[in-house]
Image (cartoon, grey):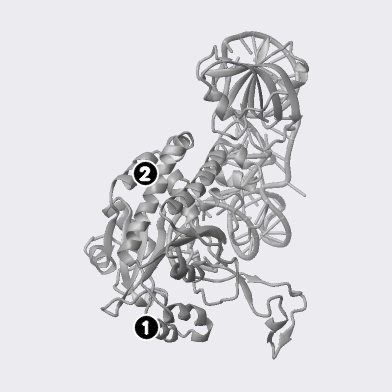
Amino acid sequence: MIERTKIIELLKSEKEQESVLLNGWIRTQRESKAFSFIELNDGSCLSNIQVIVDNDIGGYEDIVKLTTGAAISVTGKLVASMGQGQKWEIQASAIEIMGIAPDDFPLQKKRHTDEYLRTIAHLRPRSNKYSAIFRMRSKLSFAIHQFFQERDFQWIHTPIITGSDCEGAGEMFNVTTMDLNNIPKKDGKVDYEQCFFGKEASLTVSGQLSVETFCLSLGNVYTFGPTFRAENSNTSRHMSEFWMIEPEMAFADLQDDMKLGQEFVQYLIKYTMEECAEDLELFAKFVDKNLMATLDNIVSNDFVRLPYTDAVDLLLKSNQKFEFPVKWGSDLQSEHERFLTEKHFKQPVIVYDYPKDIKAFYMRMNDDEKTVAAMDILVPAIGEIIGGSQREERYDVLKKRINDMGFDEADYWWYLDTRKYGTVPHAGFGLGFERLLMLVSGISNIRDVIPFPRTPKNLEF
RNA sequence: UCCCCGGUAGCUCAGUCGGUAGAGCGGGUGACUGUUAAUCACUAGGUCGGCAGUUCGAGCCUGUCCCGGGGAGCCA
């Protein structure tokens, strides 16, 4: 029995091979008089390999009836192709049918819309575009670890289930084993004491608060895992379940944070260009014609660094008509961010030092007492890809901020402890993994860069 | 959640003035061919998103609900 060779290896071959075994799914079959051409794909790479099946092969009548989607096992010779368009092809000596695909197989040999493919999310990775994005997703997941591990950041597995309702980053999903048809109540309210954990439990909206405690122990750390937001968001940039990367650096300030953010994004894009060249080419050709120019631009220039106050001035002086007015103290609207990154600078922009009232309690108060050391990295087409800040490390200031914002400081006892015992300046950010994938692929809907998207009213698969 | 647009064959779409539906691709059958989304001929395939209404008559008009897309908010 010969060992199976993946198509990616066969296509890279330096010489002909007498005897190879390959498995895969038929992408298309063209029948000729004395033989048939099969385009076979096994997911190892974007390219198919062409298999020549002579009509004297065993079971030929059944083989030529195979349609797009069928799975076969091929034994044969790797030979130089007589046709144009490919270097190698397989001269089959035997074909075993593993699984047929009846004529209602939903993927056809033509372009399908993303909307349609989303309704068959269990089959869409068998298409070129989706196999490409999911290979890139895998490669980039690895690259993220490589980036941090090369820099001695420790990967911290922060919890998915959390008891703090104080993460403050949005609506949370509840986690319970209680009988929802008969919820235990006390004084008219849900009696969480009878719940599994004895208190209200939720899915995490951010690992940041947890990972900060490890930052203030192990130095440089990061999280990379699923994150959940129960917001009723219906946009091409939001999902209820997504993956987020949150690095946190001890003995670091906002400048260090911006530097890390830029290096990180540039590293991942370079990695994609080097390690996913074939898949990337598909996106540059069929999804976004400007993709390579956009990526080149991002890796070869420093990101613009622009204080929020200057951004407001710039927008006010731009003579642009905006639907929403630009005003110091208000958050920048999408249209404002788009103007900065897409029209004015035409490259990534880091806006920093935002008004304190529009940002989270844990962000470090600047000396002007009006702004906090926060930064957002904005990129063309996607908008905010990174949101970060230097954290408030001063115990008294942090405590005051918690109280001023109407939170109960008792809920934050362990978080405050980290500032009570050996506090140090530190900073970090969150990067949405799917938004990064959108950036490097040109794919414009976030639901198309994750295997099974979870969005409001959508939990199929 | 709000604003705008859409839902017609397996897929992508056309459908005029309100008069019971068409194309291309895909499927099937056959022809032809070292082919490359092959080509050519024939053929099957429809609860026009659901419900209610207006009308002699609704794919088309009205209401409502569901689903999808674009934009906005929330943010990564």
Which numbered dot is residue A233? none
Looking at the image, residue A399 sits to the left or right of residue A354; the answer is right
Same-subunit check for callouts 1 and 2: yes
User: Quick one: label 2, few (<14), some, or many (20+) residues within 10 Å?
Assistant: many
Q: The disc numbered 1 marks a residue on which chain?
A: A
Residue A252 to residue A280: above or below: below
Q: Where is mark 2, residue-wise?
A: A295
Looking at the image, residue A82 sits to the left or right of residue A98; the answer is left
Question: Which residue lies at the image location 60% right of the left edge and 21% below the top edge?
Answer: A50
Determine the secondary structure under disc 1. helix
Q: In this view of the protein, which residue sits in the foreground, A286 or A304? A: A304
Q: In this view of the protein, which residue sits in the foreground, A87 or A172? A: A87
Residue A357 to residue A287: above or below: below
Give residue A193's position: percent from left, percent from top: 70, 83
Disc 1 from disc 2: Cα separation: 41 Å
Residue A420 to residue A203: above or below: below
| Residue A270 can be seen in this image | yes
Give residue A254's position: percent from left, percent from top: 32, 66
Q: Earlier in the sequence, mark 1 or mark 2?
A: 2
Question: Which residue lies at the image location 42% right of the left edge and 51% below the top edge?
Answer: A150
- Mark 1: amino acid: Val
Looking at the image, residue A159 sits to the left or right of residue A443; the answer is right
Could you say which quadrant of the image residue A372 lies in? bottom left
Q: Where is mark 1, residue-wise?
A: A397
